[in-house]
Amino acid sequence: MSPPPAPAAAVALAACILAVTAATLAGADDPYRFFTWNVTYGTINPLGTTPQQGILINGQFPGPRIDCMTNDNLIVNVINNLDEPFLLTWNGIKQRKNSWQDGVLGTNCPIPPGSNYTYKFQSKDQIGSFFYFPSVALHRAAGGFGSFNVFQRPQIPVPYSPPAADFTLLVGDWYKSGHKQLRQSLDSGAGELLPPDALLINGVSSPAAAPAIFVGDQGKTYLFRVSNVGMKTSFNLRIQGHQMRLVEVEGTHPVQNLYDSIDVHVGQSVAFLVTLDQSPADYAVVASSRRFGISPAASSPALLTATATLRYTGGGAPANIPMPAPPPEGIDWSMNQARSFRWNLTASAARPNPQGSFHYGGIATSRTMVLESSAPAIAGQRRFAVNGVSFVVPDTPLKLVDNYNIANVIGWDSVPARPDGAAPRSGTPVVRLNLHEFVEVVFQSTESEIQSWHLDGYDFWVVGYGNGQWNESQRTTYNLVDAQARHTVQVYPNGWSAILVSLDNQGMWNLRSAHWDRQYLGQQLYMRVWTPQQSFSNEYSIPTNAILCGRAAGLGH
Ligand SMILES: *[C@@H]1O[C@H](CO)[C@@H](O)[C@H](O)[C@H]1NC(C)=O
Ligand SMILES: *[C@@H]1O[C@H](CO)[C@@H](O)[C@H](O)[C@H]1NC(C)=O
Ligand SMILES: *[C@@H]1O[C@H](CO)[C@@H](O)[C@H](O)[C@H]1NC(C)=O
Ligand SMILES: *[C@@H]1O[C@H](CO)[C@@H](O)[C@H](O)[C@H]1NC(C)=O
């Protein structure tokens, strides 16, 4: 695999930041990569027909790609030149012992307009395809996202031959309305966002705007890294005339099955190999939206399609074969495919838990949480909730509240472990869990839309997907041998998904709907993974440059 390019570093700046970070990062001997990111508004035209305001990083939409290597130290100075507070989060980067750098409102103060914050973190023990995105104020709907590829170190093998090159595809739904307008509609209490207007691949919607072209040689094999960076739409991806060999799911290595097409839900990433075994021509890379259920707000969302091109060197004419058809609309095909994603037990390299437990199925769980999503009206406003509690963002990040023992902000354990039928309410729940607990979480949907759930700081084993109401007897159906490990799991309409997670990463971690309107309207909570023995080997202390806001403003680091 091609090594990542050398970091664009200002040497003088490097020397001074190094002195600061060496004290707080364990991997001080690992290489450093420096980035300075200028976040601004700018005009973009992803639909080719509708110039609109986008969020750019260093003038780019999507934002710059991060290519780094396992254990690299990343120093990202984010300068906010928007007119609103801004924050980036690193989807799938586990921030080991370091939830301080997670970049969500429960861990970080947003960066005020005209100000900057320098993230300092390590891609510790990870290999794979991830992405970053803005985590506040629906900025994500306007851009600010980009890919984040972590390459293996030379001495670490991955379970496939090096591809000739790799291609990165950021695919997501898109709105003609700007993020402020979308926010207004959510703030009005009217409910979820209406269906999106388009689907984009790498920032363009075909055919009105120039679609992305990926060029390769006949006979060679290429790695495609695909992430769903959208707001709320699952998609299916396929390549005309070619099969896809799945080799990575969010930093873990699955059994390498061949697929004609792959479903990717919001917040998820996959990587697959494609061998250019056809005659030289242009082949369509097609993403189309998956609709599954019918949403109450929109009885029939339109099928959205985006197309890019896989071009053989010497090709250039469209292949004379049929376009690849989308899979059946229902749940069954997708759920069966999800069950076919299984962990390759003999593959080395990145594992969900650094101790490398292959026997997760034999570990006793310390507790079960059944988290049921709902869309209640609270004080006349449509909200989204988990077990009846709709999360309200506090004036001070929970991580700071905990660090400084600030009273009356956190609702400790205020979300019930199971749906209890109590009246829907607002709150700021943090679930207290002990370091090294082994926990079962069941995501229960009673709604007709597909959902997607993400946990920061962790990978988890997805041991089961089912229809209807989960109960204890479903445990007999769990895959306790080779379930796929990942950080984001879809939940099918009126169905459930069950995960097991080994809580080996101390910190304050966001568990949230990856559907961004649901997250924005309260479908999230935090988990504090903690131990009374305070030790830097468990968790780093507050960064010296942490922004202090709300009730933490003016307190010393
Ligand atoms: C950021 O970009 C804006 C717009 O291009 C420019 O005016 C500003 O000087 C840039 N700031 C930095 C720190 O590079
Ligand atoms: C803002 O950037 C400057 C360098 O330009 C750096 O010294 C400073 O630490 C940054 N601020 C924060 C809060 O990271
Ligand atoms: C699993 O990984 C091993 C070790 O790298 C590899 O040789 C094997 O082909 C993989 N198995 C499957 C079924 O993908
Ligand atoms: C549990 O769920 C299964 C499958 O839906 C159902 O057949 C069974 O009756 C349920 N058991 C209990 C105790 O509710």
Image (cartoon, rainbow, N blue to C red):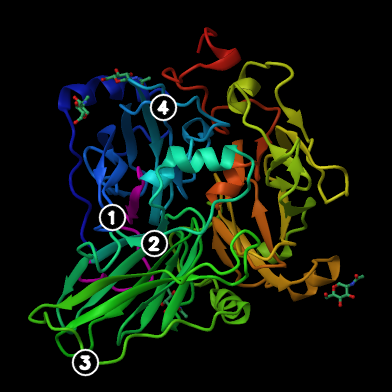
- The magenta region covers 143-165
Does label 1 or label 3 sit earlier along the sequence?
1
- Circle on res. 46: 1
Q: Is mark 4 within 8 Å of ligand 1?
A: no
**Does the residue at mark 1 contact the one at mark 2 (Cβ under 8 Å)?**
yes
Quadrant of the rendered image containing residue 14 = top left
Cα distance, mark 4 to mark 2?
26 Å
Cα distance, mark 2 to mark 3?
27 Å
Nearest to viewer (mark 2 / mark 3): 2
Q: Amino acid at mark 2?
A: Ala
Q: Amino acid at mark 3?
A: Asn
**Above or below, comparing residue 150 to residue 396 in the picture:** below
Picture coordinates of residue 449, whole percent (x, y):
63, 64
Does label 1 or label 2 sit earlier along the sequence?
1
Does label 1 or label 4 sit earlier along the sequence?
1
Cα distance, mark 1 to mark 3?
28 Å
Q: Amino acid at mark 1?
A: Pro
Image position of 413 (left or right of 401)? right
Quadrant of the rendered image containing residue 41 = top left
Q: According to the image, label 4 marks what residue?
A: 84
Badge 3 marks a residue whose secondary structure is loop
Q: According to the image, label 3 marks what residue?
A: 320
